Amino acid sequence: MKRNTLLALGLVLGTCLALNLSRAHAQTPASPPAAPDAANRPIRFVVPFPPGSGTDTSARYFARKLTELSGHPVVVDNRAGGNGFIAVRAVLAAPADGSTVFIGSNSTLAVNAALFKALPYDPVADFAPLSMLMRSPALLVVPGLAETQTLGDLIGAARARPDTLNYGAGSAGYQLMAELFNDAARVQTHHVPFKGAGEAVTAVVGGTVQFAFAETTSAQELIKGGKLRALAVASERRVPALPDIPTATEAGLPGFSAYTWVAAMVSAKTPRAEVERLAALFTRIEGLPETREFYERLGAEVMPGGPEQMRAFQTSEIQLWKRIAQKARVELQ
């Protein structure tokens, strides 16, 4: 009897202990979820131009590939207007934690420094470079139904009627290209500003302005469809996607060249580890055969290079456009 009694008592004590442990576990507050690390945060690409521009096209391609590689979402935030100042302010006002990336262009990251007396940001000191993305030769375009058939026709008309032909420019970069053209061709044409490259190209299609410089990436379908006519490509060689368009040299303006380019930056206050992590992802995307093929179809080319190469290139571009602005006697804004 004693043995049976002890066994029963043990069973009762064991059951009570199990119940108490269960209650204690239920009453213990759950551990807070771990904060998401940098690699899992959503990323925002801020673009200083409207949808449809070459910069926007690059941003959306890299956003898609970055999502595929990293597994976390990337959204594109278009902040057009104000010479890129609106987008720059949005980037620099955001937390400098790697979650906001500026997809900038030659206009915002180099040309603005040559055109403005008091730029409200420093394109070098305020940003940490991640990577160069692409380069695209500029096309000089006129309306598809214009009487102007050649670059010589446009130059002849501009010389015959000084300062009466209008050119559209959706950014500082395109404005300075046109002023460089004015200087090289010894003509005077009038600047009409637009919020983005797409609006400027639309104005050419509609005949609101007589000509503009446009990216191959955003203009080639309009050229193939007859809505635009390209008089020349401002590069050393013809564009494979548009093989019938002569270079500026072939069209009668020797040595004239102008390119647009796109690069990725973050706030200079971003931790170094975050800069390196993002730079590695961008570099990996640039190296994909799909990326090269994507840009070749658009008449552009990949610009490989990490933070150091990007900074050296940006600095040289700022110096270049400052020289061009002075040579063309562009009045600083």
Image (tube, rainbow, N blue to C red):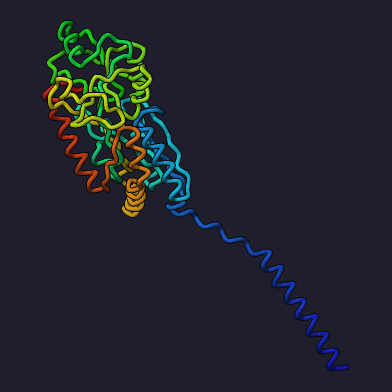
Query: Which residue: 38% across, 47% down?
Result: 98
Q: Is residue 63 left or right of residue 111?
A: right
Viewer-nearest residue: 79 or 255: 255
Query: Which residue: 15% across, 35% down?
Result: 319
Q: Position of residue 126 (x, y in %)?
A: 27, 40
Q: Position of residue 90 (x, y in %)?
A: 38, 35
Above or below for 38 versus 55: below
Q: Position of residue 323 (x, y in %)?
A: 12, 29
Q: Position of residue 91 (x, y in %)?
A: 36, 38
Residue 297 is drawn in which quadrant? top left
How many numbered discs sit on the rendered protein?
0
Q: Is residue 105 visible?
A: yes
Q: Is residue 270 visible?
A: no
Residue 188 is drawn in which quadrant? top left
User: Which residue is farthest bottom?
Assistant: 2
Viewer-nearest residue: 214 or 23: 214
Query: Which residue: 30% across, 34% down?
Result: 300
